[in-house]
Amino acid sequence: MKNFHYVLPFKLRKPIYTGLVLCYLIGSSSSANASCRPDILRTAPTERYIIHENGTVTDTKTKLMWQRCSVGQSGENCELNEATRLNWSQALQSADSSVDSGDFAGYSDWRLPNINELSSIVEYACHTPAINTDVFPRTPPNNTDFYWSSTPVKKKPAESHALYMKQGFISRNSRESEIFVRLVRSVSDLQL
C-alpha cells in the first residue's frame, strides 16, 4: 500500500487516525460540483483567472493558459461529451495532435503540464474535485480521478506523476493507467 504525505496551506481540526492515512473531519458547503469550506482562504480564486470565450482560461498568477475542459469534453461549460481517459503516451499524443492541428482556440503550442503547473490550479479549500469549478467546469470528481502531468518519476521509468483531483495531492501512476488530461500553454505578459 502506498503512503502519501500531504502539505496543506491551512490548519484542519479533529485528526482521525485510520492506520492507513491521516484524515480530517471537515465541514463543507457545496459550490457547483465541488465541496468547499467557506472559512478557508481560497488558493485559486476566480478573480485570479481570465475566462475567454474560446474555451480557454488564463491564470494571471502563473501566466499559463489552460483549456477549460478536460480532453474529450467540449461546450461553453464542458457540457458536451465526457472527459476521456488516456494512458500517458496517449496523453502526450493528444497534446501533439492539438499542436499539429493548431485548431484549439487558434494556438498551436498546447502541451501536457508538468506536475508543478498542474498543482498550481488546485483549490485547497475544496474537494471532490479540488479545483475551482467556476473556472474549470465539470472536472471529474470521483475517487479514481487523476490527471496526467508530463513529469516522470525519478528512477521509475514506467511511472509519471499525476494529480489526484478529488483532494488535490500528487501521486505517481503507471504510464499504462488511463486517466484524465487537461492541456496548457505558456503566455507572455502581452497576452494577458
Image: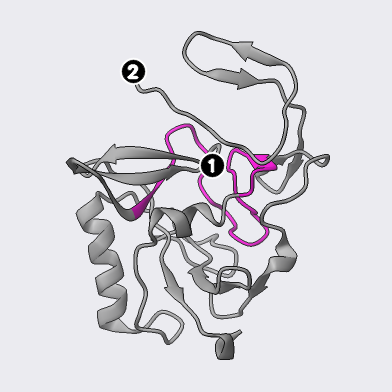
In this picture, residue 52 sits left or right of residue 6? right
Which residues fall within the magenta stretch?
123-149
Residue tagged 2: 1
Residue type, numbered disc 1: Gly
List x then y, in percent, for residue 94: 28, 65
Looking at the image, the residue that sits furthest to the left is: 157
Q: Earlier in the sequence, mark 1 or mark 2?
A: 2
Circle 2 sits in a helix, a strand or a loop, which is it?
Answer: loop
- At x 24%, y 44%, the residue is 154
Residue type, numbered disc 2: Met
- For the residues labelled 1 and 2, the Cα–Cα distance comes to 19 Å
Colouring chosen for the image of the structure: one colour
Residue tagged 1: 168
Circle 1 sits in a helix, a strand or a loop, which is it?
Answer: loop
Q: Quadrant of residue 167?
A: top right
Q: Is residue 172 above or below residue 58?
A: above
- At x 56%, y 56%, the residue is 121
Number of on-image labels: 2
Residue nearest the viewer, comparing 54 with 9: 9
Residue nearest the viewer, comparing 120 with 79: 120
List x then y, in percent, for residue 134: 68, 59
